[in-house]
Image: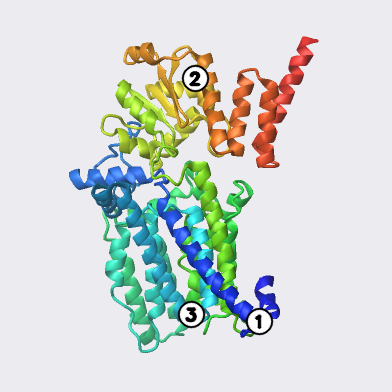
Amino acid sequence: MVVLVLFPAFFGRKDCTIIKAMERSLKTVLLIGMLAFALLSALKPIGDPDFWWHLRTGEYILHHGFPDRDPFAYTNPNIAEPRERVIISGYWLAQILYYAAFSAAGAGGIILLRAIVVALMYWSVLGRMKKFVADRTVMLLVLCLSLLSFFSYFKPERPQTFSFLFFSVLLGMIESGGPGKRRSWLIVPLMVLWANMHGGVIVGDAVLGLFAVFFSIGQRGDLKKALPVLLWAGAGIAASLLNPNTYHLFTVAFAMQNQVFSRFITEYFSSYAAFTENGDVQVVFYWILLALTIASLFFSKGRPLWRTAVVLFVGSISFLYIRNIAFLSVGLAPLAAVGLEGLLKLSAPRRLPSGLARLTAVVLLLISLWHYSKEAVAEGSMRREVDDYYPVSATDFIRSAGISGNMFNSYGWGGYLIWRLYPDYQVFIDGRGIYESIFTQYLIIARGETDLVAGLPAWKASLDAFQVDFVIMPDYEPITGQLQPLMLKLMREEKWCPVYIDTAAFIFVKDSSVNHDIIARYGCNKQLFKEKLLRTLLYRSAAAPDFRIYIAIGESLWYLGRYEEAEQAYGRSLQLAPGNATALSDLKALHDYLASQRTRAH
């Protein structure tokens, strides 16, 4: 903000040749930056793990209709619950659209579809923004902040992107009304379409309700003015009930907030927790937009009550759950522009030079380009393949080797495994998180919990209860960097044998009649497996240094008895992420272990 205020003081003469040349250069750089941003966005692979179960569900519904029960997981209880029905059929129209695009043009069809949806979303935002502010400097700055906030947290191949598009369109319909103007009755097909593409329609219904109530209060008992708005909003809310789950869509959505898995899935974290616990500095873009949106309440013409209610509601749900951030950073971006324009007029009455807009936009775009280029190095994002995101080769191995029985799989990979392996295999769990009880059992197994159940450690008792025959998971936790606890447990079990490992996944198979031949052909000595694990981790660290992978390397070296090298690996992790709690804890544990060994030796 200081730069915005001081810029005119340094460059006040608009007729200065140097300044004009700078503005032309900045315009060129901005254009190149925007094109680069679009190119990098287009080249990014399909990175959302939930996309794949959406794709398979679209195929299933298209060919078989709505299923009565979840066909993709073998762990679901015998009795169906409303949440299961909502998850299976709540996105059906978006899922069929995705499947049609993928069938027609593969990954390129999805990339094109998501580009169209995002373009329409920001076209709607820009159209609304022009009605609120006249300063192009302000519009450009807020649009850049909005783009940065959106792409920091959302993969546009998910159905929720439709919710953000429809939310902006809905707000445009609300804002279009006024003295002598009728609001569009296209709200009815809009809400029907929205309700059959994504559950975010409940946010639209809440905003419609707030608008109707507070608009009516603002009319001070004038029923003639209030009644048309009440009928219009009521029609929109009623239209949203025209979906396969009717009102269950709303009851299930509210019940989800209190379930166990919501405490472990990052998209249910608050923006504050995302910053303090996950170190997500990009949340600052959202916070800036939130502050500007709140500031707009003091600069809006007329200050209508309904707008205050909507800002407070959307601000609350976006702050409390990062999965809702785009409802504010995209949907309320025009109001953020009002707030910015108002603040700038207070501090600098003159209209700001266009060169400042370009300069600031260039800086923001350079930040975004850095973000994408960093991710390109870390994740192989310049390629369209999904090998670095998902267990592509490991899935090929499961099919080619003919592994039999029930699998236990990573929560994040469930969707991809559904796409690749159904109907020959069913998953243990996936990103839908349909049943809380199954997610609880997943945590018990994945964490290797040791509380005794029927005389067995809890993790082993749960594996036996679900008759699990093989396990496919990533070798370390993507958030903490620690080696998978379950992998470490299985390495100590005689009945479990490693048969596969690559840079993405490992596979353990239980020695039983159904897979005895698999172990005979592909079984690996566990000491050799540890060495292979270390080699894969070192290979990845050379390709893309990251503090998490060095934590995994440190732990792997520790298990191999190479303590000095393990200490160096933890030190490298702390160089990349100073103060990281996991690295510090593991390093202290290593020092304590070595101290105890020296004490025993004496």
- Neighbor class of circle 1 (other Cα within 10 Å; few <14, some 14-19, many 20+) is some
Q: Nearer the viewer, mark 3 or mark 1?
A: 1
Residue 206 location in percent, x, y? 42, 65
Q: Can see residue 70?
A: yes
* Badge 3 amino acid: Phe
Q: Which mark is residue 374?
A: none
Q: Is residue 303 above or below residue 594?
A: below
Q: Which residue is mark 1?
A: 348
In the picture, measured across the screen, residue 62 lies left or right of residue 80, that is left
* Badge 2 amino acid: Leu
Taking the spot 31% from the left edge, 40% from the top edge, the residue there is 80
- Neighbor class of circle 2 (other Cα within 10 Å; few <14, some 14-19, many 20+) is many
Residue 183 location in percent, x, y? 33, 79
Q: Which residue is mark 3?
A: 132
- In front of the other: 88 or 256: 88
- Considering only order in the chain, which callout, 2 or 3, is on the residue closer to the N terminus? 3
